[in-house]
Image (spheres, helix red, strand yellow):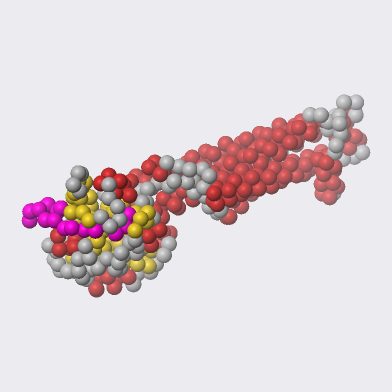
Amino acid sequence: MNSLTLYIARKIYSADDSRRRVSRPAMKIATAGVAISLAVMLISVSIVSAFKHTVSNRIAGFGSDIIVADFVSLQSGNNYPIQMNDSMLSVLKEMSHVENVSRYVYKQGVLKTDSDFLGVMMKGIGPDYDSTFICRNMKEGSFPLFSDKENTGQMVISKTIADKLLLHVGDRIFAYFIDDKGPRARRLTVSGIYETHLAQYDESICFTDIYTCRRLNAWEDDQVSGAELRLSDSKFIAETEEHIINNVNRTVDDYGGTYSSKTIYELSPQIFSWLDLLDINILIILALMAAVAAITMISGLLIIILERTQMIGILKTQGAQNSQLRRVFLWFAAIVVGRGMLWGNIIAIALLLLQKFTGIVGLDPATYYVDTVPVEFPVIQFLIINIITFAICIAALLAPAMIVARVNPSNAVRFD
């Protein structure tokens, strides 16, 4: 009997009756409503998912997933040293999911040209630093291999700093450092200029060798500002952080410093709180679009039922049961929904591919951290959205399909 109800539903869908001047446009509107609603849902999920991953990867790429540093430094924001000898490095490197451990030393300074000056934060790094992210974002020059044994006299600055001080690759500039030991100067050569669109970093961070920064701080050879841990996947951050808390944190080094750690989420809470708010926006969009798809389908099905009242009456006089007639119109609705979902997927994927390969829709990097709208194709999420959309549309049509039970055969056969 299911094959019969499906056959009748197909005949209704494909019927080309000139007298049905209302139902045909209603079917097209219902199909378009489902297609547009589904396309909007898929595109929204794709963009927000890609945007969150892109921004998170940029922040982690510039810094790390987890840092291990002095407890007072992490709590106060001041720059206190922590011992990072071979023994501690081995402990951190041997942890599960840790791909790279790199030491760094911070030193505040002032860059001065003949006409201007600018306060910056020098980040001293060594050969263990993972420069993959910075190299991908280099605008001019190159990222040198910084030494932890000698002063290389080189530095890498951001495009923001370069524009403010009118600097170019190859320029030599004096960097001044003032502390309780008095003013000191270093002459450095700009070897590269980067741009990440992360304002909090681009406006202040310059890279130089860890040897220079350690000497300026008057620290011992095994003392640093901290160590950056890059993981194989960000989903392991919580697990790795728990392991560090249990095995490293609260221990004391040979100089009296206390080890502590923070994750990327704790280091940049405002950004990640903002990214989390995007999930709420997505839920609202999904709910609204699902409602639009369901409402257009309900309207279309009601019109079809009203125009097919005479057919319903005839089928009832031939012995058709109400349950069988309901299945006919539910099959019909499933065909319309399925066709709309097919077009919705085609439209969404086509637009996403266009954006992926052309970057036709741009963004203000000062506000959104990226210069084009990022997209990705989360297949599992797309599949779930399709299934839920289909289920919601069919569930919403159960009530309109009950109308066939109210059709009186004796009146329906005279209905035109």
Q: Is residue 8 magenta?
A: no
Q: Is residue 189 magenta?
A: yes
User: Would you say 414 lies left or right of 78 here?
Assistant: right
**Is 65 situated above or below 345?**
below
Question: Would you say residue 72 is visible in this rendering?
Answer: no
x%, y% of residue 98? 37, 67
* Residue plotted at (85% across, 37% down): 16
* Between 321 and 253, the one nearer to me in the picture: 253
x%, y% of residue 27? 75, 36
Q: Residue furthest left?
A: 181
x%, y% of residue 137? 39, 55
Question: Would you say residue 54 is visible in this rendering?
Answer: yes
**Is 412 situated above or below 110?**
above
* Residue plotted at (40% across, 58% down): 136
* Residue plotted at (37% across, 60% down): 135
The C terminus: image quadrant: top right
* Between 355 and 48, the one nearer to me in the picture: 355
**Is 353 situated above or below 219?**
above
Counting labels gives 0
Which residues lie in the magenta part? 176-193
* Residue plotted at (25% across, 68% down): 147
User: Would you say 174 lies left or right of 170 here?
Assistant: left
x%, y% of residue 293? 65, 38
**Image quadrant assignment for residue 298:** top right
